[in-house]
Image: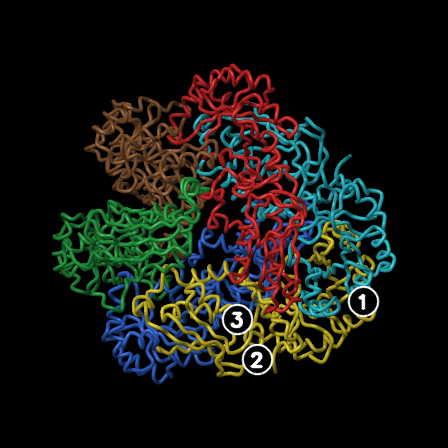
Chain colours: A cyan, B red, C yellow, D blue, E green, F brown
Amino acid sequence: MADAHPTQGAAHDGCPPHPFLIEPLLRRCLEEDLGHGDWSACGAIAPDQIGKGRIVVKETGVVVGLGIATQIFALLDPAFRCTAAVEDGMVIEAGLPILSLEGSARTLLMGERLALNFMQRLSGIATLTRRYVEAIADLPAAVVDTRKTTPGLRLLEKYAVRMGGSRNHRFNLSDAAMLKDNHIALAGGITAAMARLKAQVPITTCIEVECESLAMVQEAVSAGAGLIMLDNMTPEAIREAVEWVAGRARLEASGGVTLETVRAIAETGVDYISVGRLTHSAPALDISLDVSGD
Amino acid sequence: MADAHPTQGAAHDGCPPHPFLIEPLLRRCLEEDLGHGDWSACGAIAPDQIGKGRIVVKETGVVVGLGIATQIFALLDPAFRCTAAVEDGMVIEAGLPILSLEGSARTLLMGERLALNFMQRLSGIATLTRRYVEAIADLPAAVVDTRKTTPGLRLLEKYAVRMGGSRNHRFNLSDAAMLKDNHIALAGGITAAMARLKAQVPITTCIEVECESLAMVQEAVSAGAGLIMLDNMTPEAIREAVEWVAGRARLEASGGVTLETVRAIAETGVDYISVGRLTHSAPALDISLDVSGD
Amino acid sequence: MADAHPTQGAAHDGCPPHPFLIEPLLRRCLEEDLGHGDWSACGAIAPDQIGKGRIVVKETGVVVGLGIATQIFALLDPAFRCTAAVEDGMVIEAGLPILSLEGSARTLLMGERLALNFMQRLSGIATLTRRYVEAIADLPAAVVDTRKTTPGLRLLEKYAVRMGGSRNHRFNLSDAAMLKDNHIALAGGITAAMARLKAQVPITTCIEVECESLAMVQEAVSAGAGLIMLDNMTPEAIREAVEWVAGRARLEASGGVTLETVRAIAETGVDYISVGRLTHSAPALDISLDVSGD
Amino acid sequence: MADAHPTQGAAHDGCPPHPFLIEPLLRRCLEEDLGHGDWSACGAIAPDQIGKGRIVVKETGVVVGLGIATQIFALLDPAFRCTAAVEDGMVIEAGLPILSLEGSARTLLMGERLALNFMQRLSGIATLTRRYVEAIADLPAAVVDTRKTTPGLRLLEKYAVRMGGSRNHRFNLSDAAMLKDNHIALAGGITAAMARLKAQVPITTCIEVECESLAMVQEAVSAGAGLIMLDNMTPEAIREAVEWVAGRARLEASGGVTLETVRAIAETGVDYISVGRLTHSAPALDISLDVSGD
Amino acid sequence: MADAHPTQGAAHDGCPPHPFLIEPLLRRCLEEDLGHGDWSACGAIAPDQIGKGRIVVKETGVVVGLGIATQIFALLDPAFRCTAAVEDGMVIEAGLPILSLEGSARTLLMGERLALNFMQRLSGIATLTRRYVEAIADLPAAVVDTRKTTPGLRLLEKYAVRMGGSRNHRFNLSDAAMLKDNHIALAGGITAAMARLKAQVPITTCIEVECESLAMVQEAVSAGAGLIMLDNMTPEAIREAVEWVAGRARLEASGGVTLETVRAIAETGVDYISVGRLTHSAPALDISLDVSGD
Amino acid sequence: MADAHPTQGAAHDGCPPHPFLIEPLLRRCLEEDLGHGDWSACGAIAPDQIGKGRIVVKETGVVVGLGIATQIFALLDPAFRCTAAVEDGMVIEAGLPILSLEGSARTLLMGERLALNFMQRLSGIATLTRRYVEAIADLPAAVVDTRKTTPGLRLLEKYAVRMGGSRNHRFNLSDAAMLKDNHIALAGGITAAMARLKAQVPITTCIEVECESLAMVQEAVSAGAGLIMLDNMTPEAIREAVEWVAGRARLEASGGVTLETVRAIAETGVDYISVGRLTHSAPALDISLDVSGD
């Protein structure tokens, strides 16, 4: 594994969530962990004691969250200093330091757990994502995420997915429309549902149609769908759909994809493969803080 | 596996987080998923269309989140009806329905993803917890959680841990004090740190001391610590500490505990075993929604 | 003028903003108008005094806001009753009542101003929108709105635009991407900017390119733009672009469009015409409350 | 037209809303426009790209909002620089720059729309206000605003009215009391209503009485009203009231006042003329941003 | 002592703060007391256990807060029932019950402390206020409060003052203007300060001037002040000011007023006497909850 | 009286509430006092006028709130300067200045009242606390506070108690568990309640049992209670409990303790004496601001 975004060029940083947008979340999470105050740090350590520390990865993986950790400490104490040794999205080997910390020892101890909780989770997602991406790196299909993210953390988890080298699907229910089986059933079929929906959505809104058979795919294409989800189809069925559509719409395979099955799906020629477990079941990457008194 | 809380008695429901306390979180998470509105549901489905559905577990596990799912749909639409077929904390076999839904089809579709995201994650935590609990069920040691929870979801994840049959460690930095290696180093040793801290904390606050050697354990007991964490010790070292302490303090083993190692640790006679991966690395339990139009 | 949404069919209500999503806004606006309390109503009128009233349009126009007014009174007092005589989006003649109110006289007086302020503004937008829509009703072009909305009221104002018979452009900067002149200049041209952006955005995100000349339109089509904004072009230039593009991309005309110029633009064959003044300069529709004591 | 507040003296800046008080509003409005992030700016432009721009008025009018625009950019990025060329309340001729911007190109593009939306609306209000003020500049009557402001923007819109040279009426229902026809009817007449209300309100609270006839005016004066609103009276009736009251109370004319009718009303000798359309129907002033990459 | 508001008549309830306006405060205070949950109530008591209780006054005083207590329990549990035996503002003798409670025993125990904390404090304020009011009940002067209230509780404490039979001074800095010694010094004297301020404030805003000598009073009257505060003057000086002003302005005596000095001040003929200790130093009234299991 | 925390050592500052945690409270309180703006300061004083002032104690007492006052002014205006002459927790004699202020005269006047309201209240609590502490300074018993604090201000009031030399009891219902008479009755006795509760609470949670008789104390000790509240017992009964318990549990006396009775209770040998009136009935300490123009 090498740098996680070699193709992005010098002009790009992967569009991290703007600090302005995640500050309210970080404030609430700090309040959650601080309760009415940190008795251990404030009761045992002098207010002017300086502390230094290094955040270190304990297992090799894609690191994400350096900016978020920095923002957490800054919310507690604007004078606290964080210095990054690497960049979000890089693959770091076990044992290497990634962020140096220096400032009030109380602040260091108060912010530690939240910073690590975020970094471990986001790096875990990016590391798992990268494994999927690498499994099909020589094929044109792209891995994409889903809305199966941790409630409250979607911006950050989708950013971790990008840092793992994957692309994002829609962020929320207003970002794009998707006609699933239930919508289609309740609306009287794909054609009727598409007609009604196309008259309502903003002119910039993408409409995706979920299909379970080639017949549904054919109806969706006729109705003007530009993006079609192939739900829980076998590689054979996916291949058949790819051939029939022949570029008239983009195609996304979905449903229980694992590291074992992703390659066979990608080989069908489908454009996108969405993988829920990137965000709902990624184990944390082991990251910890080494503190040195002075 | 049988019912997850057989010993709790008829008078008890496991102290679920009060709806009043989690409502702000649920509101923010709904806003996260709705964006500026659900075009698919509102654009394709009539406002007076009724929908029915059942939430079903797809793999056997401990179910948690029935009340939370119910509260989510109620926030969107007070007239929506959820009827639970089981109770939080029960082990449910794959394929069984756990919650029936009926009401506005739009509401059903708008609340679906968030309700499932919560139930999958919390049930995943409870299911993994239960595996640890069962691994040492014949031994007196108790499994406990940590502060390595998902930022923002601590109340819910700690509840899931209880529903898995485990106990909670402190919820936040004000709940209890813990003198870790850094506190001890910066304060000039266990004895000095304990003296200073005991004079500051509320009279109800428990102080735990993290120890890495028997010598530290001995100093902690002398300094009056009622709870001692044995950090990354081998089972042999833990056993030695248990014998030396002989009941004068409660002892907690901690550090990289897995399903493979938990039993050997429990057999040392330690009181508690804290396991970070209960919350930071539990895979989601597969739970989904079956919708029926009418 | 007749009913504002004749083509929407019985299954549809125009996707009004969900009450859950606008409740925080309505609460803040009530707080703004109440200050620390309504001395006039509470000081002069008994708490159990019942009041009745009717909201009446004083000039003919498209009415929007019946649900919002109802929600405002309900936030103050769940027992207050509002009964709508018409539906959002209908054209109502001057003098007709649209909403009957009954309940605590204090509540009636406390909610009056805010309810009217919303209805007047939203109805004003819908009424002006309808004039644009009717001006080109026999042509295929659709009028669309912009992001030039009142800060804080975008969901409601875009809803008013839909109720006036028009379509919405993107709601915010994450909904869709648009490469304007500045982006293009800073990124080194349309082709380079499109390449970079297409690799970053979610797979469902529409990218629009703003063009000021036919050459730019040609480059945008080559770069794969599906939607192109023709910025401040003359009808002749628009027509030329329409002919050259020949359906390979959708085209939007933009820039200083008025009721006087909209028809000539529509006759070029362009797909969309965006009109900022729908939301930034619509005069309020005259709507008032007639109160009857009992 | 010359400087908008020539009489205010060097010591005064027109009491702009304190940044502390409007920061929550500006944050919400930024969140409204950013959604989950600005794909166009972040996806196409490098994070260290510098951008420069100038905000320019495109039609002559009273400019308001320089401080607000500055605060918006500072919320996104404390390092961004805004330099004002003029002051709020000045009349600026079409084509002149009013605010120079320099800093991160991403920030420039992210804050542009919101800053312009505020400035266009507030300057539109101030410009319309000034026309009313100038129409009666040689008469002692003062134009005042109403509570018919945009929900959520009252502080800013009332500030724009002051910058247009006019005075404010009460800001909210607790600021001052007003007995309208409904209060009077429900309370059993002016005398009874005044007696009850005077016993309840703070000792600093002004009570205004709305009157529709000279008889009501006479009763209001007898009951001790210091401020009387003459509702929808003809200039003749207003004049009669002015003469009868003879300075024992201040008088405010109200109801459908336009630029065509304001002068005749002012000539009656009334003290104040309240004009709802200052805030509910002012067209936006055309203001735009010229960006230069550099 | 008898009923606290005998003169208010059947039509009046003393204008309690609207539940809509205090709900956010009550929510935050509940969160403060609950922390992450009530272990005692939830851990020891079954969820379906019913509890009954009565709130009882332990010392004679003016009771305030029945509605607030009711709202607190309703926020926790809409099914909980509170039944008031008396009304806010009544003088209740020691030992009498004032509010009956019935519902979930957990809710009863969770809401108890906050409900009592509010009732004790507000009743303490009302009871002390009443002592001041009674001390001068035969004189025309009215006791008024100040802004020396508990941060965050101003609406409720000012309501308690009204329930004690007193009147309110301004609620906040925008409600009314007051030129204190510092304003006057910095603005170059009363006359100059009044001139400048009168041109800026809303036409409904009362301006009070703080004076320390008869000369200042004379200047204030000349400058058009309608309300004058006599700051820390002796009764003799107050009397002199009363005589000189002779009704041309209302007069308020202020500064260190106690139950011992209030009568001598009132006998001067001054209109109002403001007393900071009504709110900053009132001892709590003893009120407690008697629970009966059922 | 001398310095309030002579035993705390150089390393300690008494654990003041972290600025991050109280900022939301201070913001809301500023909004409460500012309303829609300070007309007096902004209307009469130039924006660039500098003001200086000193906060002075008018009666001898323990001062608390210097950091809070500083934070209040900084929220309004980051450029404002506050310089403390003393430290929180010190006993200051009447007439001495404690905090110097310098900056915008408008800011000085806008923040004055809130800063003083906090300092007066918190210093009043600390001063009263110190009187209790000194009354038993030669005895081993410690005075502790209760949850009878002002709603919303618990962190600050508990800090004031610590600054007065006393210790804190639990901060909220999740901090520690307490089985009161009602819990015990509803749960079927101490033994049953303890058993159930011990199985639910976090392993760090202290459980206190409220007892009204020696028999209850004996049952509580047998059930494993480490902390026992002796409710409204006579000194004789307390002494008897102390002797019987003989160190097997810590004991807290509670109920109507006054300065007159505290010493007799302390002489019983009880560990803690909780005093509700420290926070619910402390009179404010007289503190004021002297302003000098330049």
Q: Which label belongs to residue C65?
A: 3
Cα–Cα gap, marks 1 and 3: 37 Å
> Which corner quadrant holds the N terminus of chain E?
bottom left
Let me know if residue A294 appears in the view. Answer: no
CB under 8 Å between callouts 2 and 1? Answer: no
Residue C253 against residue B170 in the figure, above or below: below
Q: Which amino acid type corresponds to the residue marked 1 in the rendered image?
A: Ser
Pointer 2 residue = C91
The span from disc 3 to disc 2 (Cα, nearest Å) is: 13 Å
> Which residue is painted at 50% across and 30% down in the image?
A104
Q: Position of residue C285 (x, y in %)?
A: 52, 76
Q: Earlier in the sequence, mark 3 or mark 2?
A: 3
Specify whether disc 3 shares its chain with disc 2.
yes
- Check residue D148 in the rendering and tell me which mark sits there, or answer none: none
Residue D81, x across and y down, in percent:
58, 48
Give the residue pinned by disc 1. Answer: A222
Q: Nearer the viewer, residue E249 or B68?
A: B68
**Helix, strand or loop at disc 3?**
loop
Q: Amino acid at mark 3?
A: Gly
Q: Residues within 10 Å of mark 1 (few under 14, many from 20)?
A: few
- Mark yes or no: residue B110 visible: yes
